[in-house]
Amino acid sequence: FEDQIIGRNISDSFDINVTFPKEYQSEALAGKDAVFKTVLNKISLKQKAVADDEFAQNVAGAANMEEFKEMIRQRLTGIAQDRSKEKIIDRILAEIIESSEFTVKQEFVTDQAEKMKAEYTAQLNQNGWSLENYLKMNGQTMEQFEEMVKIQASTRAKSILVVNAIAKAEGITVSDDEMETEYETIANMHQIPLDDLKKRFRNEDLELIKWIITSRKVFDFLIESAEIE
């Protein structure tokens, strides 16, 4: 693939012809010929940066390299803690669901499945893929994908019911101040003026934000209350 790009110029449009390896992970594509319609958008050169104070200032706004290293250390620690917390939460919710008796309406599961399919599609579109092409590349049919989503949607639906039940039982609510703080976080993340962001919110967006805060508080409650081996 790369060899056929050599010698091209920026804005060139061309075809790249390849043959997938016989041992390719997707049996549907293994050994098959393919043509990639390609546009060369830019050419860049990687250069090894010098790890000095100037580099730290340019990259992260740190005063010096030591401060930059500490920033990275704290960030990696935070990521590790978040991942550990997610695993604990998944484990706790799975145990609660397993030991509980409740009925989930099929309409609710179907609604969650549709939302999950939309989420997958949106994420793929952001990376320049369509759902159909992505499934084809991975040797998966739409029926197989929808069956997978249906299973995941059932778990999500049960988790939502459990979180809502715990929030109600423990009197966990969301204050206006907490909502406002979340708005500010979202505005800063997307670099949008707070007032402009609020104008874009639909009722379902507000409900989603409230749910996110509620679930976060429920998860904190579960971790504090659980006996973890």
Image: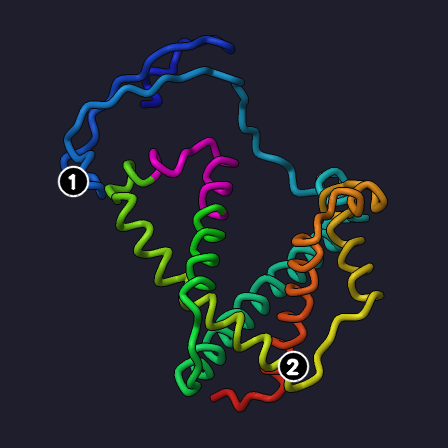
Locate residue 177 relative to residue 77 in the image: left or right: right
Instruction: Identify which residue is drawn at 79% across, 66% down.
Output: 178
Residue type, numbered disc 1: Glu
- Mark before the other along the chain sequence, 2 or 1: 1
In this orientation, does residue 193 appear? yes
Residue 222 vs 34, above or below: the answer is below
Q: Residue at x 50, y 41 (%)?
A: 122
Q: Is residue 95 left or right of residue 200?
A: left
Report if residue 130 lies within the magenta region.
yes
Quarter of the image where one finds residue 206: bottom right
Which residue does the image show at 44% across and 62% down from the upper left?
107
> Crowding at label 1, few (<14), some or many (≥20) Cα neighbours within 10 Å?
few
Q: Position of residue 210 (x, y in %)?
A: 70, 63
At x 57%, y 29%, the residue is 47
Q: Is residue 18 magenta?
A: no
Near-viewer residue (167 or 85): 167
Mark 2 crowdedness (10 Å alpha carbons): few <14, some 14-19, many ≥20: few
CA gap, disc 2 and disc 1: 53 Å
Q: Quadrant of the N terminus?
A: top left
Quarter of the view holding residue 26: top left
What amino acid is found at the position of numbered circle 2 in the picture? Lys
Judging by the rendered image, the residue that carries numbered circle 1 is 23
- Please tell me which residue lies in front, 32 or 84: 32
Mark in the foreground, 2 or 1:
2
Q: Secondary structure at mark 1?
A: loop
| 215 w.r.t. 50: above or below | below
The magenta segment is: 119-134
Count all numbered tags in the image, as a single digit: 2
* Circle 2 residue: 168
